[in-house]
Image (spheres, rainbow, N blue to C red):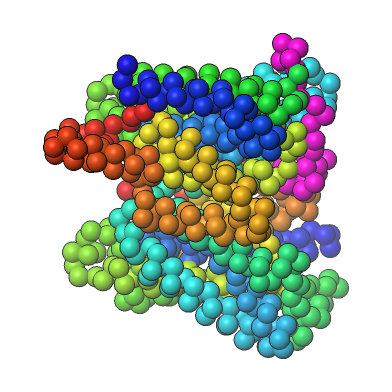
Amino acid sequence: MQFWIVQTLNSVSFGGLLFLLSSGFSLAFGLMRIPNLAHGAFFMLGAYFGATVVYIGGDFWLAALAAGVGVGIVGIALERFILRPLAGNIQGQVLVTLGISFIIADVCLLVWTGDPWTVPAPPSLRRPLLVAGFAFPTYRLVVVVIALVAAVALYFLMERTRLGAMIRAGVDDMEMARGVGIPVSLLFTVVFLLGAVLAGAAGAFGGPMLNAYPGLDADMLPLALIVVILGGAGSLLGAFVGSFVVGFLYNFGIALFPDLAYFILFLPMVLVLVFMPQGLFGRTLP
Amino acid sequence: MNRTSIAVALGAAAGVAVPWIITNDYYVNLASQILIYALLALSLNLLLGYGGMVSLGHAAFLGLTGYSTILLVLAGYDQLTTAILSVVFSTACGALFGVLALRASGIGFLMITLALGQIVWGVAYRANALTGGDNGITLPARPAPFGIDINPAWSFYYFTLIVFAIALFCIWRLTRSPFGAALCGTRDQPRRMSMLGHNVWMVQWLTFVIASFWGSISGMLYIYYNLFMSPHAISLQQSAEALLMAILGGASTLSGPIVGAAIITIVKNVVSTYIERWNTLLGVIFVVVIMFMPYGLVPGCMQLWRRLGNRTKGGKPAAPGTAAEPAA
């Protein structure tokens, strides 16, 4: 019983982390029509930034903030100086993000070496929470709360603000959005920045759960891709549902069939692609 | 005799002469490596250059063939049966992957191939009992086709060269066939092609299967060359390197991927002996090539050649459309 409860909580918290990672990825993909293949590298960079701040004695929450800001700066630079000159060349943009991800991963290896960096959870959250005789890791519960708060905030941003309305208009019909005077290219920067900040912060929050190690980017990128393939590009709800589906499958896959954890992800992807190739909540992209 | 056949004759002569010109085993092995990667890049280029489909999971076929070859040999099958079964298995996986990836087009296709490639990598990485996980597994010995020993460097080079030449001929025939023309048609004008009665999906799927077949053949050469398979050989970097070879050389040409494979393989080997930062360099080459050389070296050089030729002949304008034609 304890096994199932703990694994369920682990799945939910991993799903929350995946939501932080893939919501920005999905929004940027929906708007700009390009999957940012450096997104896994952003996550890893955030994890290393966070670990570094904690190691030099910074507060954990400050570390998460620093990771978000730091990765956000990298994201803005990538969007402005590399992606912008390639506007219109979607294939080139995607491949460039892949090249950037190799550079980031290799620089991480150079700076933070090949040994994994373990990140301690904040001291106040280290003691397990005892409810009805079961011990819950407090930190993982907090990650779930953070993900839910982020989900609600993103929902309000997308559905209740002018900026969100402009982003939705851009996702639905870019030509029309430009036609009615929405500064779509500025939106590109804003959404890309949002995705980078979320990925960086997710990396820092993921530190105590996953550690920061070389190859973290290659572990996370396919998960973000599968979330978006499942949920549909540009859909916040799709990213939310997809993240928790992938979180459960991946976590229980690792716990029950460690050899085949990746293969288990393959099945839902196949089913969705066969029956709903645009994803559960996505629209067909032109 | 036109310029193309001269180039082919020169290329063949150079290929055959390599072990005589460079007697050092290290460089002969490097030449074998170039041919293996050139075949991988050529097979990927069927999708990329001729079909307009960007696949980021092509290294999966190296892995599927390599791992199944080792596992079948360890299970006691003889080398010929193993080679046939593993290529068939890998191509069959390719057929399945093609069905899935072609549910989407454009960027969706790229994402699905990437995810599929990473799943193959993830299974290789995690399934310790079968694949040895991170440590990899070893093939006991190279086969001896028709009783010929292919263990020496020069002898393996000729084995690779023969397989490569057959593959190159088949791929060249394919691109010049009506099927190749239909493929280019589905790349440029899919709606018109289906209007003309072509089954666009079937053309693309068959291309995917053919590309995975030749990718599997290069995987077979790869495992005979290295006698060792680990998840690093089929990582995203490997797929991206193959893609970069095709783009760097020029994806719209047949010779481009070969040139790109030669350059990337040589640079990688040279750089790796001095510094450990190959991945950074790979990323930088990626960015630079895509931003400043989107059509690759071979079309770029041919354009330059033509321009120079025109200047000496008194400024005869180049015939329209020759630049885009898949040549040489």
- B296 up-or-down from B92: above or below: below
> Who's the residue at 76% across and 66% down the image?
A115
Residue in front for this viewpoint, A260 or A154: A260
- B5 up-or-down from A240: above or below: above
Quarter placement of the N terminus of chain B: top left
Q: Position of residue B266 (x, y in %)?
A: 57, 44
Q: Position of residue B64 (x, y in %)?
A: 66, 33
Q: Position of residue B14 (x, y in %)?
A: 51, 27
Residue in front for this viewpoint, A85 or B258: B258
Residue in front for this viewpoint, B35 or B313: B313
Whether residue B277 appears in magenta in the rendering, the answer is: no
Q: Is residue B108 visible?
A: yes
> Who's the residue at 21% across and 34% down the image?
B321
Which residue in the rendered view is the most extreme toward the top?
B146
In terms of image quadrants, where is residue A247?
Answer: bottom right
Q: Position of residue B222 (x, y in %)?
A: 66, 33
Whether residue B130 appears in magenta in the rendering, the answer is: yes
- B107 up-or-down from A106: above or below: above
Which residue in the rendered view is the most extreme toward the right?
A133
Magenta stretch, residue numbers: B124-148
